[in-house]
Image (cartoon, helix red, strand yellow):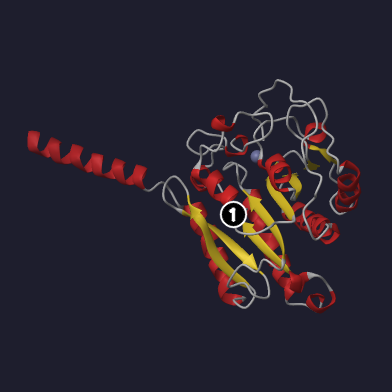
Amino acid sequence: MLRLLGVVILLLLVVTAAVFASPTTNRYDVITTELKGLEAAHSTIAQIFSIGKNNEGVDILALRVSVTPQQIDPKKVGHLLVATHHGNEPHAALFAIAFIRDLIKRFESDELWTSYLPQSEWTIIPVLNISGYNEDVREEYDIDPNRDYPNPCLPQESVGKLASVQRLMELFDTRTFSGSITVHGYLKSLSYPWGTFATSDKTLDHSEYDRIFAKAARFNGYPYGTGTSVVYSANGCFEDWVYWRHGAWSMLIELDSGSPSDIKKTVRAVASYFDDLSSSPSNQHEFSATCTEGEGIAIE
Ligand SMILES: [Zn+2]
């Protein structure tokens, strides 16, 4: 009897160890399969690559779309879309896939010969927070990935704790990105820097941002403005970091419901945003406001 009990306990330990060593991967597997299918069907313009491994040693996959997708071409204008910092916002990953499908369609249409597309290179990361996505939780290892980026109002040592965030920051060492999008849900807004706690939320590019976003928002009817004015102030967010640190034009999407029609209209809004952007990053992206105290509210 004791021996039988011992065997049962051993089996339980083995299963528990297996579960913790390899958390549920079903949801990310679905996205991976989707990416591989798109790559196989459109290999001349779409290639999968890894931006590196997260804390669990899992590769964070990206898709590169360009007329020469096998490698980075620094002469092309770089654009980035990263979704699913928060694992419990699953429509962000679906949005990234819908965006890829639309982009591929444009690359395979006559638009390729009448637009800037041949001179552009796109990097799309559908899921940054893989374990959170699989478990349907906001955080990654109990850390909010979208509060883990340096900004002028945070001490350096308090951020960059997650490997996924480190890998995404390192991606910016591989090439210049002119335009950037990050996708969340479900507050229905399009926003641009600043979103950090400061005496002013206006960048030196405020009027240019306002012009570009007004046009983009016509496609989906979303409210638009600075992160602070249409979402809420928060510290350590990707959308501020990418502009402050690299000058990349920055859009944060908060999807509405994430329904098929919401996604379709927002894909058009995003296409308008990218079409309208300058082909190079801003050269006046410094932070000129004064930081104020604040912790940020963890809602979306
Ligand atoms: Zn979010």
Q: Amino acid at mark 1?
A: Leu
The answer to which of 258 and 194 lies nearer the viewer is 194
- On the picture, is 259 further left or further right than 217? left
* Residue extending furthest toward the top: 293
Query: Can you tell which quarter of the image residue 70 is in?
Result: bottom right
Quarter of the picture holding the N terminus: top left
Total residue callouts:
1
Whole-percent x, y for residue 86 in the image? 60, 41
Q: Which residue is mark 1?
A: 171
Label 1: which secondary element: helix
Quarter of the picture holding the C terminus: top right
Query: Which residue does the image show at 81% across and 70% down from the upper left?
Result: 116
| Quadrant containing ligand 1 | top right
Whole-percent x, y for residue 223 in the image? 85, 41
Query: Which residue does the image show at 62% across and 53% down from the upper left?
Result: 172
- On the picture, is 76 further left or further right than 146? right
Q: Is residue 1 visible?
A: no
Query: Can you tell which quarter of the image residue 80 is in?
Result: bottom right
Q: Is residue 290 visible?
A: yes
Whole-percent x, y for residue 227 in the image? 77, 36
Whole-percent x, y for residue 58 in the image? 44, 53
- On the picture, is 19 further left or further right than 256? left
- On the picture, is 19 further left or further right than 7? right
The answer to which of 181 and 42 lies nearer the viewer is 181
The crowding category of the residue bearing disc 1, from other C-alpha atoms within 10 Å (few below 14, some 14 to 19, many at least 20), is some
The answer to which of 208 and 145 lies nearer the viewer is 208
Q: Is residue 231 above or below residue 246?
A: above
Q: Is residue 199 above or below residue 44?
A: above
The answer to which of 218 and 72 lies nearer the viewer is 72
